[in-house]
Image: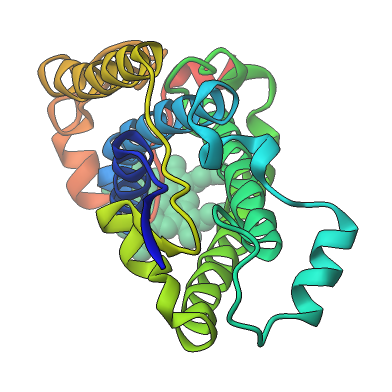
Amino acid sequence: MKKSYIWSLPTRVFHWLFVLFILLAFLSAQEDRWLDYHAIVGYAILILLVFRIIWGVIGPKYSLFKDFPIGKSNVKEFLNNIFESKQKYIGHNPLASYVMISMFIVAILIIITGILAFGIQEGKGILSFLNTSLFKKMELFKEIHEVLTSLFIALIIAHLAGILSDRLLHKKHETLNSIISGYKVTQEDKSIKLNIYQKIFSILMFLFFVGFLVFNFYKPDNILITSKYEQIDYNVQNELFVSECASCHTLYPSQSFT
Ligand code: HEC
């Protein structure tokens, strides 16, 4: 048995940033007043996904989408031999490939419906112009966003269940360690090596990602989250109304009634 370098550093950094930012997305969704942060986290995940999709086309062998064995015969073959310890799939196995691809697609749909809901419901972000025309549909996009989120949680559970069963059935390949170290145990040496373009591309994408976060930190009122309306501080405008009446009556800006 040999140790082969399967997951390159950019693939692993993507994986763990994706984990971290999905976690942040769930946490920042817990309170309404964190909604702007939630939106920034969503855009950050979109950058990660753009990287991963391009990486799936120009990246090293096992990260390529065409290396994902999603054919029907692969699935059948994999399930028939699932208890065998001999390893045919060095990158993703067929079931894992389905989970990965579903995760990417669902995550992108979550971000799109999130941006829609943010624009329509809050009048914020790049789709804030839809706030006037689609305001009555605001619940719809929020609900799609939330249903997709539940689907994503199911995919996370499927991913973890897959790792667990792989750990039980094919322990010696060290799949779990490989997403930290990059190495799997294989029959022969099947290592990958990044070429200079792949290295430059991943470094540029990483810098862009960090730059995006820094930019949002220093300029939180940018086009991605800013409101199409002028913020009204009702406390300043009519303090008495806020303290006496706002517990029951909701305040809307006067533009909403035109
Ligand atoms: C405890 C909750 C509550 C508070 C506090 C409250 N309201 Fe109301 N208000 C209501 C309810 C309930 C109605 C009836 C709504 C309906 O008829 O559909 C109402 C109706 C009204 C109406 C009549 C609306 C109409 O359609 O004719 C006005 C005006 C109004 N409130 C003003 C105020 C003002 C001003 C304050 C603050 C001084 C205030 N309310 C505080 C609950 C409240």
Whole-percent x and y of residue 74? 81, 60
Q: Is residue 228 left or right of residue 70?
A: left
**On the rendered structure, is 194 left or right of 212?**
right
Q: Quadrant of the N terminus?
A: bottom left
| Residue 60, image x, y percentages | 48, 31
Closer to the camera in the image, 44 or 70: 70
Q: Residue at x 32, y 31 (%)?
A: 40
What's the colour scheme? rainbow
Residue 26 in sight here: no
Occupied quadrant, residue 89: bottom right
Q: In the displayed structure, does residue 30 sit left or right of residue 84?
A: left
Question: Which quadrant is home to the C terminus?
Answer: top right
Please determine whether, in this image, residue 131 is positioned above or below residue 3. Answer: above
The answer, for residue 218, to whether it is visible in the render is: yes
State whether residue 217 is above or below residue 176: above
What residue is shown at x 22% (from left), y 17% (from top)?
Answer: 207
Q: Residue at x 89, y 59 (%)?
A: 72
**Residue 149 screen position, x and y as percent:** 55, 56
Residue at image coords 21%, 25%: 213
Q: Is residue 125 above or below residue 79?
A: above
**Along the line of sight, which residue is nearer the eye, 240 or 16?**
16
